[in-house]
Image (cartoon, helix red, strand yellow):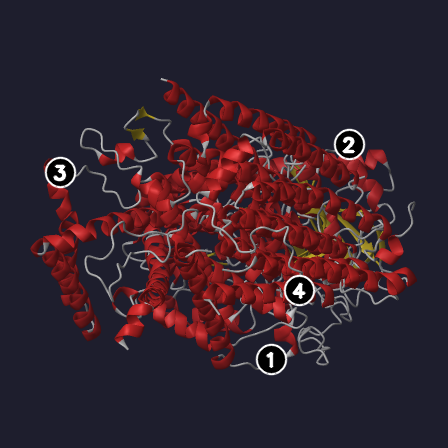
Amino acid sequence: MNDSGLHAYGPLVIHLLVAATLAGIIASLSKLIGWRRPNKAKQQAYECGMEPTGDAREPFSVKFYLVAMIFILFDVEAIFLYPWALVFRRLGMYGFVEMMIYIAILLVGYFYLWKKGALDWHK
Amino acid sequence: MVPTQYYLVLSAILFGLGAVAFVFKRNIITIFMSIELMLNAVNLAFVAFSQAFGKVEGQVFVLFVIVVAAAEAAVGLGIIILIQRNRQSLNIEKVNLLKL
Amino acid sequence: MIAFLQQYAFWIITIVKIALLLFIVLTVNAYLTWFERKAVAHIQSRWGPHRVGPHGLLQPAADGLKFLFKEDVTPAGVDRFVYYLAPFLSLMLSLTALAVIPFAPNPLPFKILGEHVYLWITNPDIGLLILFAITALSVYGIALAGWASNSKYSLMGGLRSSAQMISYELALTMSVVGVLLMANTFSLQSIIEQQANAKWGVGFLGWNIIAWTHQGLFFPQIIGFICFFTSAIAETNRAPFDLPEAESELVAGFHTEYSSFKFAMFFIAEYTAMITVSCLATILFFGGWLSPFASTPFWHFTYYIPSITLIPFGLWVIYDGLKYETIFGKLILPAIGFAMFAIGGALIALPAVNDYIQPIFWFTAKIFVFLFFYVWARGTLPRLRYDQLMNVGWKLLLPVSIANVIVTAGVVIARSYR
Amino acid sequence: MAENVNQNASAVVEHLRAWNSKAVEEVIEFHGETTIVVHHTLLRSVALECRDALQFNLLSDATCVDRYPVEPRFELQYHLTSIPNRTKIRLRTRVPGDQPNVDSLVPVWLGAGWLEREIFDLMGINFNDHPDLRRILLPDDWKGHPLRKDYPVEGFRDIPATYLPGLKK
Amino acid sequence: MTTSVETATGVKKTMVLNMGPQHPSTHGVLRILLELDGETVLKAVPDVGYLHTGIEKSCEDKTYSQATTLTDRMDYLNPLGNNLVYALAVEKLLGLEVPKRAQYIRVMMVELQRISSHLVWLGTHAIDLGAMSVFLYCFREREEILKLFELFAGQRMMTSYIRIGGVALEPPAGWRDRVGKFLGMMPSRIDEYEALLTENRIWMARTKGVGVIKLEDAIAYSMTGPTLRAAGLAYDNRKVFPYSSYEEFDFSVPTRTDSDCFARYMLRIAEMRESLKIVKQAMEKISDSGPIKSEAAGIIPPQREKMKTEMEALIYHFKIFTEGFSPAPGEAYVTIESPRGELGCFIASDGSAKPLRCHFRSPSFINLQALPMIVEGQIIADVVACIGTIDIVLGDVDR
Amino acid sequence: MSPVLLIFFVLAGLAVLGALSLVLQKHPIHSALSLIVVMVCLAGLYLLMGAEFVAAVQIIVYGGAIMVLFIFVIMLLNAGAEERTDFSKLAKIAGLPLALALTASIAAAVVKPDPGVPAVTQVVIPNATEKISSMLFNEFVYPFELTSFLILVAILGALVLAQREKK
């Protein structure tokens, strides 16, 4: 990395560290100052005043997996759209056609998902 | 400036740790994660070489690796979910049969 | 000593800048809660906070102290490490996102330790990507908080909001591509500078929302902006997309089990994200620090808009403070009012300062408008249901923003062939 | 309007008498309200007849009176409303205290479900074929049936202190 | 309670969630056990009784006039309606005629109460769906109604204003202005709520087609009130079995046919407007002077002035408040139209000064039992909307 | 030691620690968090080398999408702490030595100065992001278009897998 790179990203890293320190201080401050008098009822996980039934970390709907999965695949598309937008003027018509083909193929997948009900949260 | 070898050694260490995790971990998800770790180690080597030679092909390749990793994660985790549904376990020892 | 300072001037200035920025942002956060409570209260025909300090101005401080002295309950059965990590991560990432926002184009008119001082922490060439990278990570804070709490309401809230955040992140990233196609850069500063195309003395025609550049009319990014801002509201978990903390169903969502300052950290993170997103909307679509008027002699009077707003407002605050019941209010409010009045007057008296203040003024004003939108929506709109929310994200915003990309690309291509 | 109600009510009585001579044990008229007393074994069939033939489609209320120490001590009261005919009648059946069992009316009106649970809870009358006969207002482990006349108004003093989950040892 | 929800299949894929009793949107202390598959409700088991106060048992130990104050505490959004149904039942048992003037005052008060109850309903339902401002607007107007109650009865909520044989107090001086002012203000305020909600896309999305209760289901579950009318049946006790001179008033019974949450919302808005009409007519009908209680020696407390001049009056006063009065043995069952549906009161007398049995048919209790039918198969956010539009008051459910 | 080298060692150390923690942690969530640490450190190293774009993509896709999916799946399946079962004999006997040998041989090969590698220090590529973009859409256009097919197939595959679960 050259000097300008250091000047571009060094402050970012410092900022990250300062923010982390700040967050850490805030978190530990409440631990230090805030009083604690735990008892069994207080430490119970919230379930509307009832004793929790079963374990909270239970298997959950697979819909959430589907959403994350579709997200990954379209995120990849977005990642290619960005460099494309960067050099779009230079690529010209060629780049346009290229990306249209790319998007078209992905749209096929998108409409397939739509048709199959993967995008319907509640059927 | 950091010598390229440093990056390569780091890459090798990460790859090795990934391989160790791959062999030693029992949980399929963790095993899958160790594969991702190995891919990452390889990516690091790609980028290091690309910077060493001053050519960006390596970085383009990294992009493709990431895309492949994404597709792989999507399908692989789908399979893992199915395994869990069918065997009620994520332990690799219990999922070593080809049929149910 | 001096030599040492001068050798490391850049880094010292950077650290000071970061400290200042974080201080300002946290203060603004605090007063944003005050402003939100006040504005929503007035929408709902009530007073809002008005006990602590004049007009409740010290309410944020009181809230902060209360959070600090609250009992810090850690429920049994939580995964301690992750439970503490989650709010830490949320706050840290949302504060870090501000590092890449440029607040004004020019360095300060004087050098400190021989260095130009710019009003940004860093301004990398891929600022936009860095911002998106940080946003992409911030989903962990919420997902982990929900998982670590070992409570069903938290888990559901956490899963819901992480799914919501990633869904809208997609629409968010896609809706920006239209702007990038015209700007051809990831640098936030360059994106702003490219919008400086006044037409007929009207500056805002050049902003990306209208996109009237020197080459003629590009495809206005109104659709892109609507997609962007809608996704941004959802991304920051605000009304009407505040499903993760939909108190009517999930009580408090992912932070049900958090108390005292750990809870406040999520809160601060949310408000900081609001500010960041408002900055981004301003930069990408509304010309950042550019004035909506052209810099021609005809429009010169607009240079006095900061003074024109500050002076009467300061006078009103003085007047209001003098008739306030308590001694405290009688002192504090006129002091604030006088400060505003004085700044307004100083800006007229010192044209150089006034010149320098222009971009900052416009930038702040635009951000404030977006923040007001946030508050306004919260006071007016009912909440969407979760499936409807996902439908809006996946079936409306995503295809529309992809279509926006295609159309914008087509228009850009057509322009270049003409 | 009030007279109207009565005229229709007498027609109801006539119909029930014609349908089954044993159905109506007694008819009581009091302040313009018609009470048809039926034997508790016939209750469900009378209710079905009321619903299907006489259009008493709405079960307005069901409750129970404890006439302790008179035997049979329990009097079940079903208040029926015919929305099409604008008629109200009361079906009454007497249930003995030693064997408080009666056929549930849930198969006739679904709305009877909670009302009968309430009677079961507070009066201790068992409803045969009730799909979900559990205590409803009182905790599951409550002892006794508070609305019975032999249950003191102040309750029994030794209330089990089990209803505070946080305090349970 | 150890209510168990079995999993649908042997494989455990579902999650059992306690919604309530300490939950912001169960309108009190309702507890619902939900079995969820993701966000979809597979099974819902309501559990009530957390607010059970044994009012019916307490009534049996009070004289008839003492028990009036207990009725206030059942449905705390409709205390005057509870007073009314109790008074009507006792009056029926006694065969007592109530002066017309008192009847009109009762009508006016009960209709004001209906508006205030609907306002609370609208506000809480709106805040359940996230529309926070409507909540505060509604409570602002409800405050005006409570002020009117305070003016009439000296109490805002537990007024006990409607007594056996009439009403408690002469209407206060200047009440016409105050009520008139309220009537003048209210229609535009209702327009305001509608402006915020009725055409709102999000509101429609949240309520249209949600929580559909078909007419036959509603009747089978004995559901009454707005829920039944939103399913298309104009069953209103004020029209069908008029009481307290409702037959003299000109009003219509609004109905809707969609029977979803939106229909119930629209219906209650329309009912508020109808109630305003009734209040207006009642104001015109109430004469400036006349008896507010029926004359019945030994049952209705005599007037203050008479007590100071007549020996019998003083003796009756003493006897009424120490021994009470004893109606003839028999039963009476009266139903009125409360804001939530058919509110009934059953009183059995054995000839003593205390009721043998006093039972209230509370609409919330009966309407609530249809909840599982409505919410099963819906998603968890709709449960909130459904609870909201059934409009339950847990004090009324548990008594 | 120059600041750049210092940063390298900090990041590299963190990455190795993260990878170690991935191996040692018992709960999959903790392993996943360790992996995220590794990825963020690698992104930092890319930045250090000047590969800005790759660094951003690393965080956006790897950190913000792939690992989110991992975390989701762990949360969905409620994968608990790992059971301690005996290692299979093959792993015990052959696995660890082989893995160590692999690491050692790669490291040795790398550390040994090889005259075949012309430049051992990093060079800065000016306008790297734009070069990557141009290259991606010119020289690598076919692989680029192929990725869309890959993603399409992945969508179909994942959907089939997820939908089968419903029955």
Q: Which disc is residue A38 wearing?
A: 1
Looking at the image, tell me whether mark 4 or mark 3 is earlier in sequence order: 4
Mark 1, mark 2: which one is toward the viewer?
Answer: 1
Q: Is residue A113 left or right of residue E283?
A: right
Dot 3 lies on which element? helix
Q: Amino acid at mark 1?
A: Pro
> What is the CA distance from the residue labelled 4 to the residue labelled 2?
57 Å
> What is the CA distance from the residue labelled 1 to the residue labelled 2?
65 Å
Subunit ID for the residue under disc 3:
C
> Mark 1 vs mark 4: same chain?
no
Q: Which residue is mark 3?
A: C299
> Mark 4 vs mark 2: same chain?
no
Subunit ID for the residue under disc 2:
D
Residue that sits furthest to the front in the current view: F115
> What is the CA distance from the residue labelled 4 to the residue labelled 3?
60 Å
> Mark 1 vs mark 2: same chain?
no
Q: Nearer the viewer, residue C142 or E231?
A: C142
Q: Which disc is residue C150 wearing?
A: 4
Q: Tell me whether the residue at label 3 lies in contact with that at label 2, contact meaning CB atoms closer than 8 angstroms.
A: no
Q: Amino acid at mark 3?
A: Trp
Q: Which disc is residue D53 wearing?
A: 2
